[in-house]
């Protein structure tokens, strides 16, 4: 899994690992809206999604040295952290019998305070477009994982598919999304 030409995201993560606050700020500017959008879809509560966004980047600050470029792109790493922490948050909320009430408008708006070069609605449209371009089986697995907060085992049970098949669809779908998003960000930076 290589980086897209001209993509310095992995270098930013390396800078964060060395304690470079500017690298963290640039990483946040580049991916904050995307992480927030996924968090909001997963948690369906703006305040919880904002908290999760902060937790993700705090974890990145503390554990950037754990990032392994051989295992995936910085985007995939950030989204994995967001998904994992989001699922933990959902489980914690369920255990304490709090009800998650769906918001009427789960789309991020500019007043959310997510600093990014991309408009939040652009990020939502881009992610939605990339998801729509995936084969149905891959898209469904990603939607269940990221938007409904299901684990891979829960997805396998719900779909009646073997766990290995679900894992493969997840990995392949994320790789395709990464390729499309990398191409889109390369075009946007040109």
Image (cartoon, rainbow, N blue to C red):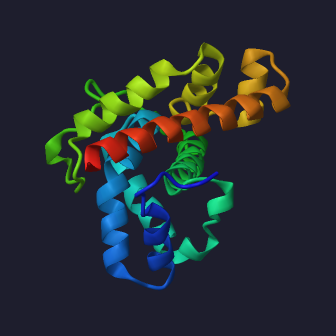
Does any portion of residue 154 appear in the rendered image? Answer: no
Q: Is residue 155 above or below residue 89?
A: above
Residue 118 placement, left or right of 21 = left
Q: Residue at x 68, y 59 (%)?
A: 70
Query: Position of 35 compared to 142: left or right?
Result: left
Identify the image quadrant of residue 165: top right
Left or right: 158 as drawn, with respect to 43: right
In this view, which residue lies farthest toward the left?
Answer: 111
Residue 14 point in image, percent of width and height: 50, 75
The residue shown at (39%, 83%) is 20
Residue placed most toward the observer, 7 or 157: 7
Residue 124 spot, x, y in % from top left? 32, 33
Residue drawn 44% across the image and 44% down it? 182
Q: Is residue 108 left or right of residue 70?
A: left
Is residue 190 in sight in this rendering?
yes
Front residue (pair 44, 81): 81
Residue at 53%, 55% in the rendered image: 3
Query: Which picture quadrant has residue 54?
Result: bottom left
At which x and y percent is residue 179? Answer: 51, 39
Count of marks placed on residues: 0
Residue 171: x %, y % from top left: 68, 38
Vertical order, 59 against 32 (above or below): below
């Amino acid at each position: 899994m290589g980086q897209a030409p001209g993509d310095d995201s992995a270098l930013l993560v390396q800078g964060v690992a060395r304690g470079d606050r500017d690298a963290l700020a640039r990483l946040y500017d580049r991916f904050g809206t995307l992480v927030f959008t996924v968090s909001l879809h997963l948690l369906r509560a703006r305040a919880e999604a904002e908290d999760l966004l902060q937790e993700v980047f705090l974890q990145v600050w503390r554990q950037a040295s754990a990032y392994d470029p051989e295992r995936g792109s910085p985007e995939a790493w950030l989204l994995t952290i967001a998904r994992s922490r989001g699922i933990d948050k959902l489980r914690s909320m369920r255990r304490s019998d709090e009800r998650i009430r769906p918001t009427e408008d789960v789309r991020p708006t500019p007043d959310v305070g997510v600093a990014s070069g991309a408009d939040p609605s652009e990020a939502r449209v881009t992610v939605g477009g990339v998801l729509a371009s995936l084969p149905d089986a891959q898209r469904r697995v990603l939607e269940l994982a990221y938007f409904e907060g299901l684990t891979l085992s829960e997805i396998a049970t719900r779909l009646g598919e073997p766990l290995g098949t679900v894992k493969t669809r997840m990995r392949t779908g994320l790789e395709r999304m990464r390729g499309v998003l990398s191409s889109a960000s390369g075009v946007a930076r040109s």
